[in-house]
Image (cartoon, coloured by chain):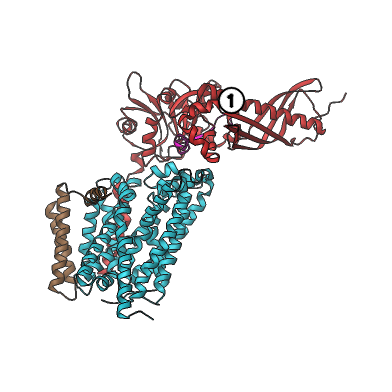
Amino acid sequence: MKRYIGFLCLLMVTTLGCWNYREVEELGIVSGVGIDKQENTSNYQLAIEIVNIKGGQDGQINHHPVITQGQSMFDSARNTILRTGQRAYWAHATAAVISEDLARDGILSVLDWVSRDAEVRSDIWLFVSSEKDAKSIFLTEPDLNDLVSFKLADMVSAHNSVPKFIPKELWKFKQELSAPGQSPTLPTIRIVENNGQKVPEIWGTAVFRKDKMVGWLDGLESFALSYALPKNAFGLIILPTTIEGKSGVVSYEVFGKTTMHSATFAGNRALMNVQVDLQVGIADLEGITPDYRETTILRMLEEDVSSFIKQEIRQVISRVQQEFKSDIFGFGGVIRQQLPHIWKDLESDWSEEFTKLDVRVAVNTTIRASGLLTAPIQMRD
Amino acid sequence: MFILLVLAYLLVGCAEVFLWETKDIRKIGLFGTLLIGSLILSALMLLGVDIPSPTGFFEKLILSLS
Amino acid sequence: MKAEVISEQQGISIVLLFILGNALIISIGAQAKSDIWLAVLIAIGMAIPVLTLYARLHYLLPGMDLFDILQYGFGSVIGRITGLIYVWFAFHLGSRVLRNFGEFIITVGLEETPQLLPISILAILCLWCVKEGLEVLGRFSNFFTRFVVIMVLGTSLLLLTEVDFSNLSPFLYHGMAPVTTAAFKILTFPFTETVIFTMVFSNFQKKSSPYKIYLIGLILGGLILFITITNEVLVLGSELYETSYFPGYRAVQRINIRNFIQRLEILAGVTFLISGFVQLSICLLATCKGLAKVLNFDDYRFIVTPTTFLMVTMSILIYNSIIEMNRWAVEIWPVYAAPFQLGIPVVLWLACELKMKLKGEYPA
């Protein structure tokens, strides 16, 4: 008797999940979504990229997105059933592209459902489309990959070597949105021509104040931004250099970078210090042959890199301070942590105080390597 | 639905009492009272009768005290 | 009633799992913001004297549980009435645990499943376990504690890659007041919920066992709770910790080690299931035992079935929504539970000490 009851209990526990059971064929596994505002209405329009698993050995994956409309995000997401007969399954979505119009109107209305729904995972990558809508991103050619979203995810995972955009996961964006003394940013996507095909390219950064997009930094400014932020960034530094009367271009490859933000108290005001330490290698000499075995020349090259990066960082900081008035560097958060008593006065009017904040940038460069060559290639007659 | 519920409770109750070694009338009384109480509550829930939750009651009590 | 003796190790395991129970998954003490780790430590500190007091009650009157002690200390009539109130407390706590479990399951996983289903299945398992008695529960806990501890500490370790230490600063930005409030709330939920054990335990192997069981259980459970909560805040940040119903689940979601070790949410679910099962069984056991004691029956097993059914219906009726559930857990519970967990035990302890001194019955 007891054994039967036990078996019954076991059966009940193990088959409980079947209530919510859904066949794989009934699910449209979403890999990415483009979110637009429908023209002339307040409706949303989603371009949902769905992985269609077809049988067979090399199942062709169809990468044309399904376009749906609805009065709210959730409504549009559910309306995929009307177009495909499949219920969208969001747990594997990797990329969400939001149109610039929506971003300028306020992104929170989009993000609420995305973060409230239990199916959407918070490690989805967010982007802003710098084209006229987000749909067109998903209409480009994914050539090497099967799907545009996978392509975007690939770009993101390799971004450290090309820090010309700053990738953002949903949770990170939300954290920046709700953290005091910090404004969020998102990478932007544009469409470029490649061999006659239209392909997406991640280039630049959308700057937000609260949840509204207020401006845009291009790829080179984003490069400086990644160096100003305390995060990993490598990439190349290309520098026109003049040495001993000859001028040319030197490329440095960055092997290591650390950025430290610290707040100090100067006079009556808070002062931000941005300390950047770079470890670079000479990667490419074009037009000049400086003999970097000489210490003086090596120091000169290091000094060149330092002053260049310093100038770039200062430029992007002052542009953000003057034009966007949005603390995307998280300086406020640093002041809050290190000088809490001062932050209490600044907190209420931070977006105004931020524009007046003094920032001191210091860059220190060490040249660590020069590739395989101990000296510039010698030319003799 | 309601009849099914009553039947289920009856089944469980009878089976349980049947398996007891000592069938004391006081025990059966308490058992029956609790079971009927639970049956009434679940029947009300099934019928969709709005029962004020004890949570709300305690909440008001505590808020009025503090 | 057959005397149920449990060993020290089993007792410690039960107390540990009971403390972890719901607290692992629900956001507690969120108003302390980034100083929450301090609040947990203070709460452990405050809980030590309270739990020593519970153990002292067992030490003074060996072989008795709370209901006997109440009748000894307050006399038969008042003792029975307070006993009945404690039965309600255990019953209500059990319904809460059950509801939290149900809400967790339908919020994160099975959205279309009616809540009654996971709730009643867990309840039926508990019914079985309680019918088998405390000793079976002790052996179960003893066996499963290692799983829970390994899983909790393991996920904490895997989360180290996502940790951001700036989430813990600035230290005491809002002053000490929110930290103390939070500490008090953490004290009442989960630490001194262990008052339930005074209703369940009655016989120990050794005379000093109650002290060991309560205090070691508290300190181990508290430390694990401290590690997980601190880790959750380190990973999520205090803002997200506060706005999540189930921060433990959210934090574990973040684990992603080179796209290889990822999607480990189920671990959080399983841990919660095991510790919630123990917590619920203890509450059910306390309710049945108490009811049988108060109404003068010699055995509690015969009312386990109807009590379980009542608890299931109660758990559905008790809140209208998860929003209400969360408000109750965070705001109302500390005030509601304080007399049961702190007030009555202190008075009872004083009464017992006094009575024993007068009668000269002090244990040697």
**In the image, residue A61 lies in the stretch drawn in magenta:** no
Q: Give the range drawn in magenta.
A: A162-181
Question: Is A285 placed left or right of A106 in the picture?
Answer: right
Q: In which quarter of the image is residue C124?
A: bottom left
Question: Which quarter of the picture shows residue C135?
Answer: bottom left
Q: The cyan chain is which one?
A: C
Q: Position of residue A195 (x, y in %)?
A: 56, 22
What residue lies at 70% left-to-right and 25% top-to-bottom? A239
Q: Is mark 1 on a helix, strand or loop?
A: helix
Which hue is chain B drawn in?
A: brown
- Residue C163 in the image, given as x and y percentages of width and height: 52, 46
Give B65 or A278, whichever is nearer the viewer. B65
Which chain's residue wears label 1? A
Which residue is label 1 attached to?
A316
**In front: C306, or C87?**
C87
**Outermost residue, top side:** A40
A164 within the magenta span: yes
Q: What residue type is labelled 1?
A: Val
Quarter of the picture containing the N terminus of chain C is bottom left
Task: Give me the chain that's red.
Answer: A
